Image: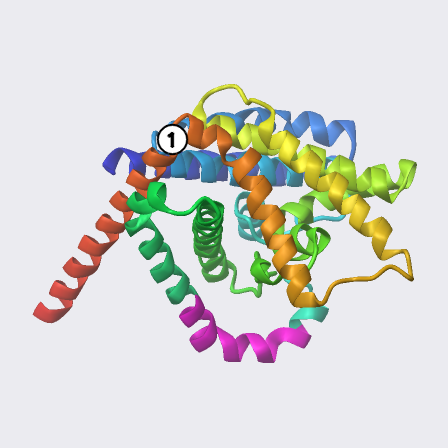
Amino acid sequence: MASEVAGLAVVSAAASVALVYARLATSRLAPGTPRLAALLPVLLLLPVLPFAFSSIHLRTVSAFFLVWLCGFKLLLLAAGHDGPLHPALPLVRFVACAALPIKVRDENDKKQQSRISRSSLPSGFLLSYAAKAALFSALVSVRCYRARMPAYAVPVFDGAHVYLMLELFLASAAALARALLGAELEPQFDRPYLASSLRDFWGRRWNLMVPGVLRPCVYRPVRARFGAAAGVLAAFLVSGAMHEVMFYYITLEAGTGEVTAFFALHGACAVAERWMARQGGMWRPPRPVATALTLAFVTGTGSWLFFAPVIRSRLDEAIIAECEGMLAFLERAGRNLAAMAHLI
């Protein structure tokens, strides 16, 4: 734990210095080749930083934050496209928006949502995440019974584990950003378990920071030249390739292509969904049925293609062991804080 905390300090400091340089350099350069050349040292440094961690969780989460999201944001900045980064941003906001999986809410949206946000954060928001943390702890505790579960229950169990783990990590990063910036942020998830189609799941509910960078980087340029269907397929293929990179940080082995195949399949199905939705006379299932079918397809294909590399290499056991260690550490820390408060 001490070595990981030291690694976290080193990675945070290195990333912050690199992003301060990126902010100062791009403020003096025009978009295009000059900005890209100035940002190249940062783009080469970021993929190296996650290797400072031996923990699978910290290595993978830092890769997601710095290699994928931050890298794409910097590419948008180099091209001069509207995005979460701009050379005129205050330095702290620029670094936070680049390094963390956040997007500051637009002023117009903020006015519409301010009343809801003020009323929901103290009670509903905190209660929701407390419940999710408790459920995640319960899933980790019963993971040893996974092998005895019915075949249909395993992908549901794995999907719930990944969803809760990812949302809790991203919510922690958002809480840090909210404390630093004092700004209202865009949601990172929107109840993906209520998705009624693949387009709804991937585009409007699941891990919204990813489509937030894929749309301007991939979908819109491809759509402008080849049409919407090509843009959707390109976005899913790039997502698959980046997930292969993320899986490399998990397994430290070359990818097998299964994760890319998962996203290529979902991209093709999303295009087919779009075509069917445009056919006016075609029957559509009721929303509860559509939601059940969507989640069944996501979990079924995920068990077949997405989780296969990790389970085959037995890294899922190491991931669970890390989760158990983290929960034990938090439990000890909570007891120590309670004891100190009692003494005071």
Q: Report which residue position mark 1 lands on.
A: 315
Element carrying mark 1: helix
Q: Is residue 115 above or below residue 281?
A: below
Horizontal and vertical percent position of residue 27: 69, 41
Is residue 162 something that shows in the picture?
yes
Figure quadrant of the C terminus? bottom left
Seen at 55% across and 35% down, the residue is: 304
Q: Amino acid at mark 1?
A: Leu
**Would you say 318 lies left or right of 23 here?**
left
Q: Residue furthest top?
A: 254
Give coordinates of residue 163: x percent, y percent. 49, 51
Work out whether residue 249 or residue 22 is closer to the camera in this orientation and state it: 249
- Is residue 207 at all visible to an observer of this figure? no
**Could you classify mark 1 by the number of other residues whose Cα lies within 10 Å: few (under 14), some (14-19), or many (20 or more)?**
some
Where is residue 103? Give x, y as percent: 61, 55
| Residue displayed at 69% across by 66% down | 287
Residue 162's place in the image compared with 171, above or below, is above
Query: Residue 279 occupies which quadrant of the picture?
Result: bottom right
**Screen quadrant of the N terminus:** top left
Residue 138 among those drawn in magenta: no
Display coloring: rainbow
In the image, taking residue 48 as reference, residue 331 lies left or right, namely: left
Give the residues in magenta.
Answer: 111-128
Tell which of 304 and 7 is nearer to you: 304
Magenta stretch mostly in which secondary structure?
helix
Quarter assignment of residue 321: top left
- Residue farthest to the left, as pictured: 343
